[in-house]
């Protein structure tokens, strides 16, 4: 069962989107703006002291929405890195955002994203947990994504990683990405990042230690309320 109106869901007296905004602010990597297609979300963020921009509610995806927002807010292109943080990660660790930005800068890749080791065996067969195949650098903390799947890859012995849906884009890479049509693998796996990979774009991977709780269902929301109470 999906969770209707989840960005405004109350978690210990604070709307979820406001909690996400606060965590992003703590990262200190640059200006934080909430892009939303719902005026109520924009109003909630502004009431909390944040900045938000109203975008077309018909925009089909988060990447398209952040592109529309950044083009509206920064037409002079002063900012050349854009981080897409979803509004359903109220307990995201600020350090994760810093690590992803650093991975993008140091790697020279088009996109960067975090992963964390899977510790719960049930996640291996859970199709909602996306698993990447990674070519790791010698430091074991950063690497290059080879593929993403809802199935276990690679199989056999060794660590398996949980992909966390946070992306840092180079500005020109984001513009290129949103201009691409959906790709065959993207449609089959229902994973947007495969569109970029099929087009030859590179995705850097950064290892982090924490998998933030993602709020998709009423059960997730109750778990977050207990965690953040």
Image: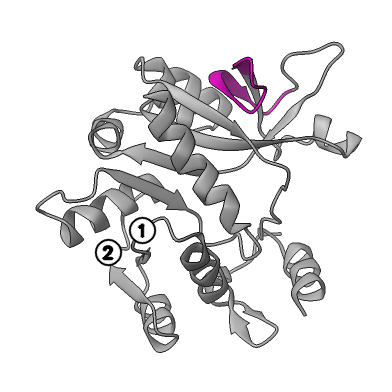
Read off the magenta span: 134-151
Considering the numbered disc 1 on the image, is that residue within a helix, a strand or a loop?
loop
- Which of the 4 image quadrants contains residue 88? bottom right
Foreground mark, 1 or 2, reads 1
Distance of mark 1 from mark 2, alpha carbons?
Answer: 21 Å
Residue of label 1: 30
* Above or below 191: residue 98: below
Q: Is residue 166 left or right of residue 93?
A: left
Q: Does the magenta run of residues contain 144?
A: yes
Who's the residue at 26% across and 62% down the image? 56
* Percent position of residue 27, x then y: 50, 59
Q: Position of residue 41 (x, y in %)?
A: 42, 76
Residues tagged 1 and 2 counted as in contact (Cβ below 8 A)? no
Q: How many marks?
A: 2
Task: Assign the magenta stretch its main secondary structure.
Answer: strand
Q: Position of residue 72 (x, y in %)?
A: 17, 59
Q: Quadrant of the C terminus?
A: bottom right
Q: Secondary structure at mark 2?
A: loop
Q: Mark 2 sits on what residue? A: 55
Q: For the residue carrying disc 1, how many other residues have a C-alpha within 10 Å: few (<14), some (14-19), or many (20+)?
A: few
């Amino acid at each position: 069962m999906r969770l209707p109106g989840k960005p405004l869901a109350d978690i210990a007296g604070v709307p979820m989107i406001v909690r996400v905004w606060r965590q992003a602010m703590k990262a200190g990597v640059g200006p934080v703006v909430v892009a939303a297609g719902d005026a109520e979300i924009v109003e909630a963020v502004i009431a909390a002291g944040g900045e938000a921009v109203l975008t077309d509610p018909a925009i089909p995806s988060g990447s398209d929405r952040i592109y529309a927002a950044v083009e509206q807010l920064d037409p002079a292109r002063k900012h050349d890195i854009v981080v897409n943080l979803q509004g359903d990660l109220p307990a995201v660790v600020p350090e994760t955002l810093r690590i992803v930005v650093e991975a993008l800068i140091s790697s020279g890749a088009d996109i960067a994203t975090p992963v964390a080791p899977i510790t719960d065996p049930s996640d291996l067969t859970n199709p909602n947990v996306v698993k990447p195949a990674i070519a790791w650098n010698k430091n074991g903390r950063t690497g290059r994504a080879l593929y993403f799947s809802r199935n276990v890859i690679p199989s056999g012995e060794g660590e398996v990683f949980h992909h966390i849906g946070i992306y840092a884009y180079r500005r020109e890479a984001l513009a290129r990405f949103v201009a691409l049509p959906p790709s065959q693998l993207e449609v089959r796996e229902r994973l947007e990042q495969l569109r970029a990979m099929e087009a030859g774009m590179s995705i850097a991977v950064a290892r982090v230690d924490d998998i933030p709780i993602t709020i998709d269902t009423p059960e997730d929301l109750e778990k977050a309320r207990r965690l953040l109470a």
